[in-house]
Image (tube, rainbow, N blue to C red):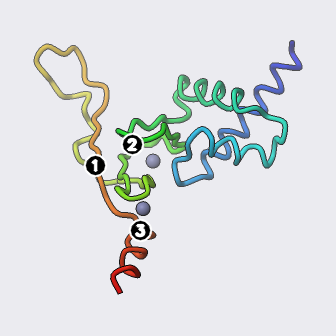
Amino acid sequence: MAQTQTRMTRQRAIILEELRKSKDHPTADEVYSLVRERLPRISLGTVYRNLDFLVSTGEVAKLEVAGTTKRFDGDISWHQHVRCVHCGRIGDVMQPYPSPDVKDMHVEGFASILASRVEYDGICEECAQTMRQKAV
Ligand SMILES: [Zn+2]
Ligand SMILES: [Zn+2]
């Protein structure tokens, strides 16, 4: 039992480490292939379970971007996301709009405001370059 616990913790630590290193907001499948390089015997189910756990403890953020596979973010500091309309790549938006201080907001009928979310659409560098090449 204690053995299992230790192994779980080590797997979780590696999952968290890989997520924090990765800047491109990987999906669960992508996390799985990142982690598998270090833990060849890990299962996709274990990765899912550990991701859920890390989200529940607030160590990892789950991205809710409309119309895309769920992605995960090892950077839990306040920021928002822009999605490339061509390939679905996610980028970080650091500008504080709307205000991150939603806790001071008052909305009629609501006891508290937990978070604000704005969805940005964009075109990533890679897709822009592909488009430029096609245009020539
Ligand atoms: Zn793109
Ligand atoms: Zn992010």
Contact, mark 2 vs mark 1 (Cβ under 8 Å): yes
Locate residue 68: give its quadrant: top left
Which residue is disc 1 drawn over?
Answer: 96
Residue type pointed to by label 1: Pro
Q: Which mark is in front, 2 or 3? A: 3
Q: Closest to the observer: 15 or 88?
A: 88
Q: Secondary structure at mark 3?
A: helix
- Mark 2 and mark 3 lie on one chain; the one further toward the N terminus is 2
Q: Marks 1 and 3, how far apart in space? A: 26 Å
Image coords of residue 104 (percent x, y) = 21, 28
| 56 over 19 or under it: above or below | above
Q: Amino acid at mark 2?
A: Trp
Image disc number at residue 127:
3
- Cβ atoms under marks 1 and 3 closer than 8 Å: no
Please provide percent x and percent y for residue 79.
Answer: 38, 46
Disc 1 vs disc 3: which is toward the camera?
A: 3
The residue nearer to you, when weighing 14 against 67, is 67
Graded by Cα atoms within 10 Å as few (under 14), some (14 to 19) or many (20 or more), the crowding at tag 3 reads some
Mark 2 and mark 1: span between their CA atoms? 8 Å
Residue at disc 1, secondary structure: loop
